[in-house]
Image (cartoon, rainbow, N blue to C red):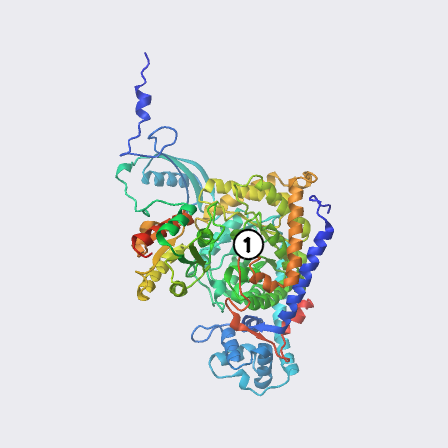
Amino acid sequence: MTSKLNLDPKVIDSARSSAKRIAESMQEFIDRHTTVSTERTILRLLGIDGVDDVDRPLPNVIVDAIKEAGGLPRGVAYWIGNAIVQTGKSPQDIAEAVGRGELDLTKLEQGSAEDAAKAVEPYVDESLGIIRAQTAKRNEYLATIGEGRRPYLYVIVATGNIYEDVIQAQAAARQGADIIAVIRTTAQSLLDYVPYGATTEGFGGTYATQENFRIMRKALDEVGEEVGRYIRLCNYSSGLCMAEIAAMGALERLDVMLNDALYGILFRDINMQRTIVDQYFSRVIIGYCGIIFNSGEDNYLTTDDAVEAAHTVLASQLMNEQFAVLANIPEEQMGLGHAFEIDPETENGFLLELSQAQMAKEIFPNASLKYMPPTKFMTGNIFRGHIQDALFNLVAVWTGQSLQLLGMLTEALHTPHLHDRMLSIENAKYIFNNARDIGEEVEFKKDGMIQKRAQKVLKDAEELLAQIEKDGLFPTIEAGKFAAVKRPFNGGKGLDGVCKRDELYFNPFIGKMLGGAK
Amino acid sequence: MMSHQNTTATSQVDITRVKPYGDTLNDGMVQMSFTLPVPAGEEAAEAARILAKKMGLDEPSVVYQRDLGIGYSYFIVYGKCQHTVDYSSIKVTKVEGDVMDRLECEKFIEENIKRTVTMVGASTGTDAHTVGIDAIMNMKGFNGHFGLERYQGINAINMGSQVPNEELIARAIEEKADAILVSQTVTQKDVHIANLTNMVELCEAEGVRDKILLLCGGPRISHELAQELGFDAGFGTDSYAENVASYVLTELVERKRV
């Protein structure tokens, strides 16, 4: 692709190389640690589900018991594998026995790690088989009923009640939506467990539970068959249960998941050590099962200035890309985020937005870029808001964005009403159709405002990445370089769930998933 | 000769009987849109028209309808409002006092308070949104209005989002704060009411309610609501750091807490 922005490939390479080295240095940290939620993910993937008599999820019951006994550094795969060897029971039966207080995994006779690994292997393979069947089902749908054109129309539902969400989601699909995201109830990201079962009470969103995933998946498959278009389902692999929810998403065939450690650190005050370790396993799962992950750079611009901080978005996208490479995620599954958040009073603000979006497309040509709508300067003047959303849609079709999270004219007022979503879809469809090939037709003036802006943002991002490489990512976050938010290395939520692995530790899924196990 | 009597008469607003204006005084013209849970069609349009009439609109006109895909329909409706309001009798509880700009606030501190004023703020409870508290407290502020961090003489501590009420109060005590600022953005199912009520109760339990000014703000907060819940003041949309600062500074002097 020839650059419309006249970007210097050497600068792009230099920035990307810095990002690569930053990600690799973080990987060394990741490979030495595990967390309670990473371990619970392994349990879920081994088929352990359900709750004990006081409604605690069994994965939590087991991990808490192992942690209490000091066995966490060895990892649950060893303890479950060893329990299979010693008792001859299945992981689920073992889990239920632990839940009833009848079994203490760390008190059993301790065999070798090799025997434990061999004992869990059939369950690992069974689980990977379920995930592969879900991926195959998605591919079958895409081959038979097909999908919408890009940019995909991406809308949210957020009623708090999964059954009400289904009604809203099916309506949105019939109106033309391609992706339905079920917004999570506020504060779920800070729960250190995943609630169980179908739920009907949430604030500003609906609990992410495996049963809720299943209910919505079924509803979207039904409406997809009816409208002749595969409808993608999105949820959040983020917060303290990042990896667990990725596993649930893989098992229940979610298609898109928000997944970004930096976001959790900056905006949810989750401890950086905890979430960077969790992110790795979640991305391995996401890469394996064909989910598109969405990173959260758009949020930087809600606290920082979209003109001044534009380069932090690009720098973070480059790092997110390299973290994804280490988790073996194909480029097409990289939903790197950015947003249309420049103050609408800015003269030529539209040109700056166009420049930024085109730049992202040129630097990540094969990624499934996720483009986020204006939120910060939505005021309650729904009429102007609808026009802001129109300009956002125009930039998206012009620059070839992939996942278009549709702006709502009632942003900042309330979670979308049924007709708000219809108006948004209508807005996007009108503009996408009316300007479909504008990107093919229009070039930018050499050394004009649009080219120069992109070149500057790229240059600034390159410099920032070089600095981060020198200082380290954790110290950079501590210094408040992203989103103007400072977070301490040993602060935030979830730190007590992090530990160093011991020499017998193993995670039976990572190798097989990275190898693309068939 | 032509008479001009009519034109002057219709341009005269009777503030004891105001009604909406479209393009002619007292035409009562209102536009609205809503969804009904019935399939689109003539019956649906008639239902929308009857409903508009029940809302007090004369000559309701359904100018647009659209099926929403699940047997529900969306309408855009115009009509002429029959009701009037006596504007002259309206009383609204507002935060009293003049609003000083940043420089005036700084001068006010220098002259009348003569020490650093500390304010601790957070978006509390389950609320994960920092946009409101950031707009008031962060250096940068919002919409061209600098935040409290920028003010000389004010020590502004922004604790961020999802801060438990207990932690906010503990920090305020630790910092010997003059004011606590609570931001609430998520208001679905009135979650903010329960949280704000809890905040007041905790402040009373901690014995600081009479020592620290307690303020709240957010898109669904009014001064009246705030006072009803036991806060000193509430700030809705279009409030900036200077509104908050002016209130706090003048109250500190008024209550002789300087």
Camera-side residue: B17 or A105?
A: B17
Residue B61: x %, y % from top left = 39, 34
Q: How many residues crowd mark 1 within 10 Å: few (<14), some (14–19), many (20+)?
A: many
**Residue at the (48%, 78%) spot, across then down:** A99
Residue B236 visible to an observer of this rendering = no
Camera-side residue: B3 or A470?
A: A470
Q: The residue tagged with tag 1: helix, strand or loop?
A: helix
Residue A457: x %, y % from top left = 64, 49
- Viewport quadrant of the C terminus of chain B: bottom left
- Res. B32 image quadrant: top left
Q: What count of labels does the image hold? A: 1
Is A112 placed above or below A488 here?
A: below
- Res. A31 image quadrant: bottom right
- Viewport quadrant of the N terminus of chain B: top left
Camera-side residue: A310 or B198?
A: A310
Camera-side residue: B95 or A104?
A: B95
**Residue at the (29%, 36%) spot, across then down:** B84
Residue A250: x %, y % from top left = 59, 64
Task: Name the outermost residue toward the top.
Answer: B1
Residue A79: x %, y % from top left = 58, 80
The residue that mark 1 highlights is A300
Residue B114 visible to an observer of this rendering = yes
Q: Inspect the image, locate mark 1, and give the three-letter code of the amino acid beneath it.
A: Tyr
Q: Is residue A423 left or right of residue B202?
A: right
Q: Is residue A21 left or right of residue A200?
A: right
Q: Chain of mark 1?
A: A
Q: Is residue A485 left or right of residue B108?
A: right
